[in-house]
């Protein structure tokens, strides 16, 4: 299985494989001359040619990226406030530039440059840029960036780093603002200016691609800065961030309510097999699939695995473990019983800790990604004796405290994309149905909210095959959602999890051809080139259904069909779409 990136989480797949490269003249400005470029809020730290074909990305251990064309590498620091320190990099092809600008995202609380995204964009001919979102100066680790410290090994959690954002961003609202939306916007503005200076011409079109936190960046750009990009690709977006992190905190509390609530090694696989036995093939998918096509059809209750007749764990579940799983699926509620964040979908159960799901998160000494709460409550959030900490977070009083401080800066929940739509912007969203970290229903909720926003005076959002829904059609003129069966968070999982979503976006923006399907591939052991299957990803709310003849491993033998209208867990209005 492909190793998941340590992000909340990074972008997916070979996003740029099919983008056509239009050859351009060699750059007119020597790369090193850009060292003296004067830009607002900007210090150019370095401007260097790389003609070696390789790049050694810093890290522990360092990673060597190969197969790179010659490029000009720009590193810069942006300081829009006296407390800001936003690192960006811009990689510029020295020949073969396709005339396009590409902004890229990362994951978690970022804190580092995501070099793999820069490399992918560069190889496809883009002038590409990436940012650490301004959290790197606070010692931010790309996976947790809370008191959880550095993670060379996903389970090697360290505490007490005084430079980490558990302390470093508390009392620093400008840095939080950088992380929330300002870093990506300024990265985009400065990046375009650097492109202009290097090529002595503007990029023809601008695109943004990101997953998880990168998905949040994507939606924030469409909402706050609609003129920055012509096309935006948003994967598994962490757009409702404060409530998503509350769900992670509630999940940790769920598994730690008593020692017997923890799920033992091997039991997530046991549960997943029971889910598939009951539900596979009942959602227009195949009964032989090792994933669900639309898990909302599945009503699996973990109590069917309750230990009886002499069985003992891990071959079955105790009553406490049944409660853990029921709460895992049910979602996060406030003290009044209102839904704060949707639950995890059935079918995402895995014992693979690199998938960052329950099997991993429950092992942590405190909730994953809880650095956000330190930004509100300060270092005391890490001490059990304090009034508010990760073990006793009050889902009545403390929700409002966090939202009052952070929601306006971090949550990309606006459904008013009118300006983005009017200037011709196109948005493609995608989300894995088996996402282990951000509930897949979240993206559906946001898309449905877009439909509802467009539907003032129309029928309530939904899909009506007999004549259609005008609000849905209007939304799909500029925004489209593709759900990915069996994909974990941004990548991996038992389903077809590798696909190119950027090429269809470029084709939509530049040629007016809106994508109806995207072909996804499942490689054997998630390692190219051996192909296990291909499957079409369908324009939501359609799903892929086998035609009844031909190989079930070939996408061409599936048709996208209207699926029965399914219930989608929707948060209470005060907690977002």
Image: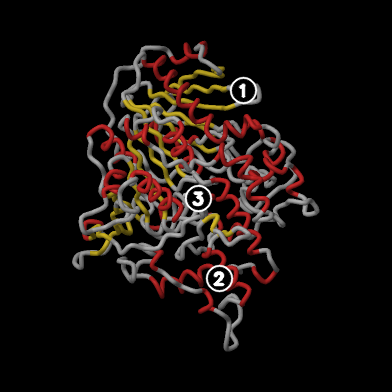
Q: Position of residue 110 (x, y in %)?
A: 56, 38
Residue 282 has which mark? none
Q: CA distance from mark 3 to mark 2?
A: 21 Å
Q: Residue furthest front?
A: 457
Q: Position of residue 570 (x, y in %)?
A: 46, 56
Front label number (2 vs 1): 1
Front-most of 234 and 403?
Answer: 403
Residue 267 has which mark? 2
Please name the residue shown 43% across and 18% down the image.
193
- N-terminal of the two: label 3 or label 1? 3
Could you say whether the residue bearing mark 2 is in a helix, strand or loop?
Answer: helix
Residue occupied by mark 1:
81
Front label number (3 vs 1): 1
Residue 370 can be seen, yes or no: yes
Q: Residue furthest left?
A: 549
- Answer with the quarter of the image where residue 426 lies: top left
Q: Is residue 438 above or below residue 283?
A: above
Q: Residue furthest bottom?
A: 309
Q: Position of residue 93 (x, y in %)?
A: 38, 24
The residue carrying pointer 1 sits among few (fewer than 14), some (14 to 19) or many (20 or more) residues within 10 Å by Cα, namely: few
Please name the residue shown 77% across and 46% down the image.
380
Q: CA distance from mark 2 to mark 1?
A: 49 Å
Front-most of 6 and 61?
Answer: 6
Could you say whether the residue bearing mark 1 is in a helix, strand or loop?
Answer: loop
The residue carrying pointer 3 sits among few (fewer than 14), some (14 to 19) or many (20 or more) residues within 10 Å by Cα, namely: some
Callout 2–callout 1 Cβ contact below 8 Å = no
Residue occupied by mark 3:
4
Callout 3–callout 1 Cβ contact below 8 Å = no
Q: CA distance from mark 3 to mark 1?
A: 34 Å
């Amino acid at each position: 299985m492909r190793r998941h990136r340590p992000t909340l989480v990074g972008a997916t797949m070979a996003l740029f494989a099919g983008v056509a490269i239009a050859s351009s003249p060699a750059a007119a400005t020597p790369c090193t001359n850009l060292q003296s470029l004067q830009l607002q809020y900007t210090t150019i730290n370095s401007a260097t040619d790389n003609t070696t074909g390789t790049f050694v990305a810093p890290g522990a251990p360092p990673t060597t990226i190969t197969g790179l064309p010659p490029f000009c590498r720009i590193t810069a620091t942006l300081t829009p406030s006296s407390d800001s320190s936003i690192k960006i990099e811009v990689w510029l092809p020295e020949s073969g530039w396709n005339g396009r600008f590409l902004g890229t995202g990362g994951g978690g609380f970022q804190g580092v440059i995501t070099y793999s995204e820069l490399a992918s964009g560069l190889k496809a001919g883009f002038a590409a840029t990436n940012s650490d979102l301004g959290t790197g100066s606070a010692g931010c680790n790309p996976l947790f960036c809370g008191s959880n410290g550095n993670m060379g090994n996903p389970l090697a959690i360290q505490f007490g780093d005084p430079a980490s954002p558990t302390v470093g961003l508390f009392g620093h609202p400008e840095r939080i603002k950088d992380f929330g939306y300002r870093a990506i916007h300024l990265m985009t503005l400065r990046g375009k200016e650097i492109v202009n200076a290097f090529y002595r011409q503007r990029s023809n079109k601008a695109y943004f691609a990101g997953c998880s936190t990168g998905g949040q960046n994507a939606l924030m750009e469409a909402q706050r800065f609609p003129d920055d990009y012509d096309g935006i690709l948003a994967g598994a977006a962490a757009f409702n961030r404060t409530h998503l992190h509350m769900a992670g905190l509630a999940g940790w509390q769920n598994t730690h309510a008593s020692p017997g609530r923890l799920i033992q090694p091997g039991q997530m696989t046991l549960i997943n097999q029971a889910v598939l036995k009951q539900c596979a093939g009942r959602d227009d998918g195949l009964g032989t699939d090792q994933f669900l096509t639309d898990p909302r059809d599945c009503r699996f209750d973990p109590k069917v695995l309750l230990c009886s007749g002499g069985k003992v764990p891990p071959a079955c579940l105790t009553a406490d473990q049944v409660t853990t799983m029921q709460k895992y699926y049910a979602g996060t509620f406030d003290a009044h019983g209102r839904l704060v964040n949707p639950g995890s979908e059935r079918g995402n159960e895995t014992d693979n800790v690199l998938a960052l799901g329950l099997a991993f998160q429950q092992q942590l000494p405190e909730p994953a990604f809880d650095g956000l709460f330190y930004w509100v409550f300060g270092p005391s959030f890490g001490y059990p004796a304090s009034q508010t900490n990760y073990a006793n977070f009050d889902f009545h009083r403390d929700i409002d405290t966090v939202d009052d401080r952070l929601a306006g800066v971090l949550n990309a929940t606006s459904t008013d994309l009118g300006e983005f739509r009017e200037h011709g912007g196109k948005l493609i969203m995608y989300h894995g149905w088996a996402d282990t970290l951000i509930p897949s229903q979240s993206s559906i909720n946001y898309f449905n909210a877009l439909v509802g926003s467009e539907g003032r005076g129309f029928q309530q959002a939904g899909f009506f095959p007999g004549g259609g829904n005008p609000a849905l059609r209007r939304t799909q003129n500029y925004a489209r959602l593709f759900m990915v069966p069996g994909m974990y968070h941004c990548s991996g999982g038992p389903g077809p999890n590798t696909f190119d979503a950027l090429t269809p976006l470029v084709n939509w923006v530049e040629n007016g051809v809106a994508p109806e399907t995207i072909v996804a591939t499942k490689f054997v052991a998630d390692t190219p080139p051996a192909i296990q299957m291909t499957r079409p990803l369908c324009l939501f709310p359609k799903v892929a259904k086998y035609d009844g003849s031909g190989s079930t491993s070939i996408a061409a033998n599936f048709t996208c069909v209207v699926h029965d209208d399914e219930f989608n867990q929707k948060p209470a209005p005060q907690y977002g779409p």
